[in-house]
Amino acid sequence: MPSLGADMEAGTLVEWRVKPGDAIHRGDIICEVVTEKGDIEVESWLTGTVEQLLVQVGQKVPVKTLMALIRTEGEGAAAVPPAPAPSAPAPSAPAPSAPAPPAPTPPAPTPSAPLPAPQPSSERTRISPAARKRIEAAGLDASTIVGSGIGGAITIADVEKAMSASQPAARAESEATSVTAIRRAIARAMARSKREIPHYYLSQTIDMSRALSWLERENSARELPRRLLYSVLLLKAVALAVREVPEMNGFWQDDHWIGSDAVHAGVATSLRSGGLIAPAIHDVGGKSLDEVMHALQDLVNRARSSGLRSSELSDPTITVTSLGERGCDSVMPIIYPPQVAIVGFGRVVEQAWAENGMVGARRVIHATLGGDHRASDGHRGALFLRAVDSLMQSPEQL
Amino acid sequence: MTAIAAAVPPAAMPGVVKTTYRDALRAAHRDALRRDDRVFLMGEDVGRYGGCYAVSLGLLEEFGPERVRDTPLSELAFVGAGIGAAAAGMRPIVEVMTVNFSLLALDQIVNSAATLLHMSGGQCAVPLVIRMATGAGRQVAAQHSHSLEVWYAHVPGIRVVAPATIEDARGMLWTALQDPDPVVMFEHVMLYNLEGEIAETAGATDLDHAAVRREGSDISIVTYGGCLPKSMRAAETLAADGISAEVIDLRTLRPLDDETILKSVAKTHRAVIVDEGWRSCGLSAEIAARIAESALYELDAPVVRVCTVEVPIPYPRHLEEAALPQAASIADAARRLVNHHG
């Protein structure tokens, strides 16, 4: 079970997309899991052949649980599980009480000695209709309830027992896409951030008039669906500024900073049902503005319909939060652990602006940087924000 | 079809009398014959013999051969005559010995009685009451013992009722006679000797609602007719085991009172349907389907049916008993459902 964010503790398998014997490639979607953030498609980190599926549909398992065995090319009897961490710096989710070892090597049982837990049966959990209704209303996880009804079905009495048993303890256990579950996920991540990360804040007012004029000219020549949003310029500027100040990009783990070559920008996206999620647009620095725009639209749509992929949740190397036109002037954002920086943009406002001894009205935006003082210092943070500013003055080069 | 309110006002000091289901039925006939001179009774042996089940004993002497008429042995003919009389303005009560025999009159009931109002563009109502005995338990074998209520409950244009208590035996006939459409009334053969007390002033009862005969919270037993007393005994046994069963007497089999059934299932979340008819395509199937259609998300367990074994009713007593729903098998089914030992 891959970690799909620092706040994820467990996930429930919804569907296997592969079966034993299937050939898979790195990046193929192998299964779908449901987490506090919704339904996520899990991609394989390996190329090879599916040897064995170890987790049943409906089962809820902790992060790092072995879910399947995949035999890689040329590999013999030993099978390698899909590692929860990508090749380099994906964030893993150490439990607060028991931090993960530096290079977690998941146990690789041989197919002859499978884990004891999973049952071979793929039978659906039996839940009476009335019990199912109550489980949904209470936001419980059916896989944690033991059924006592006919054929082991979960009944109202079982649900009520589970509810009274789980009052204080298992509250964090409860699952899925409910608003309360998302709030708890945010609570865990943000509390951890404020508990562990010594934030420093810097701000810079950026003159947006050149960028917006360029954008308006550019858009006037485009069909409606191909028009660009100014937040695409901001995302691209952040990605390019990282090249000058790489300390902003990556993770703080096990007392040291782990950088990332690519900039996977997490885009803070509010969900209609409530709550917030910040999935990644991969390699923003290597994409054209059109490509970033397309990726942004696609990502926001999928985030709001619970169609995100595992890598999008585990990969962000820096987060950008843009309040947009309905926001306020500026934001002091909180870093999403284990990332080391978050850039916030307020809304575009028109204000008096002095330049070359002249005062004029300009459209400006307030950019803020929340930096992890363990990974960088204010001086470097200031260089980074200034770089964003100067990149925004040459929008045509973004 | 309209509901007709009880016509007899309660007396200031209502006395209670001991009676039987049979006597209550006879009282209902006597009352109807007295109150409305358009009412008459006809059927095989209803006059001089006093009726196959002695319901009309003494009525010939009291009301004369014009109003209590013995007929030839032809269900087709005398049911058809009843339909004609009803269409012509009379209020006939036609007695058919058993539902098995009524199949000879099926054409008259289904093709004529049920359709005339429709076929005549609303000009020709058939205010006819057809009474018939139903059910097993008297060792009269397969050709006299079946429960074919559902054959009639299937047909639009007729109302089907099944009095299962002394009050309904006393009260349903008059209300049925007021109905402008044909009413088929099923009297379970094992109920005729049912003894009990009834208010001296007891009169007409409605034909629109199922009745909750016993309140309960753990399981709903939905039944009618001859299975009601068995279900009540089962509920009694279950209560001793700590299971609170609600017993619903359907009373009217067409149209079904969905509301009462669904309300009960919403309360108990479990249902056992007890029907002396066969399971396949039976009334129990219809009720189970309605529960699934309208109360699926209230169910905490599958709907269970206790029906007659799918054989012609056997003659030997032990086999007949084994073929029918019994209080013990009803209680067993309910217990399995509540205690999850399925």
Image (cartoon, rainbow, N blue to C red):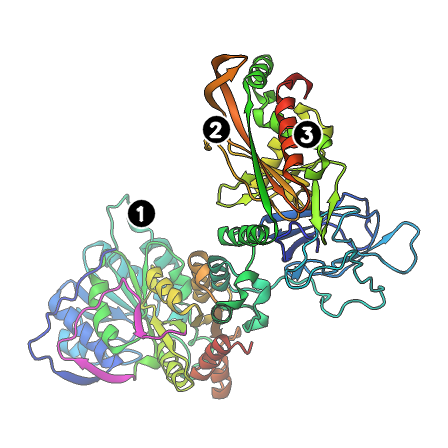
Q: Chain of mark 1?
A: B
Which chain hosts label 3? A
Q: Earlier in the sequence, mark 3 or mark 2?
A: 3
B196 falls in the magenta region: yes
Q: State the image coordinates of residue B44 (x, y, percent, origin top left).
A: 30, 73
Circle 1 Cα neighbour tier, 10 Å, few/some/many (<14 / 14–19 / ≥20) = few
Q: Secondary structure at mark 1?
A: helix
Quarter residue A125 falls in: bottom right
Q: Nearer the viewer, residue A255 or B234?
A: A255
Residue A300 placement: quadrant: top right
Q: Is residue A369 left or right of A80 when viewed as pictured?
A: left
Of helix, strand and loop, which mostly describes the magenta segment?
loop
Circle 2 is placed at which residue position? Answer: A325
**Amino acid type of the residue that numbered disc 2 sits on in the rendered structure:** Glu
Which secondary structure lies at badge 2? loop
Give, as a single range, the part of the protein colored magenta: B194-218
View extreme (left): residue: B12
If the image is split into quadrants, where does the N terminus of chain B sit?
bottom left
Q: Label 3: which residue?
A: A241
User: Label 1 is placed on what type of residue?
Assistant: His
Evaluate whether residue A111 shows in this view: yes
- Nearer to the camera, B230 or B193: B230
Location of residue A397 in the rendering, given as x and y in whole percent from the top left corner? 69, 18
Q: Is residue A355 above or below residue A322?
A: above
**Residue that carries the numbered disc 1 in the rendered image:** B118
How far apart in space, not on screen, are marks 1 and 3 (Cα)? 84 Å
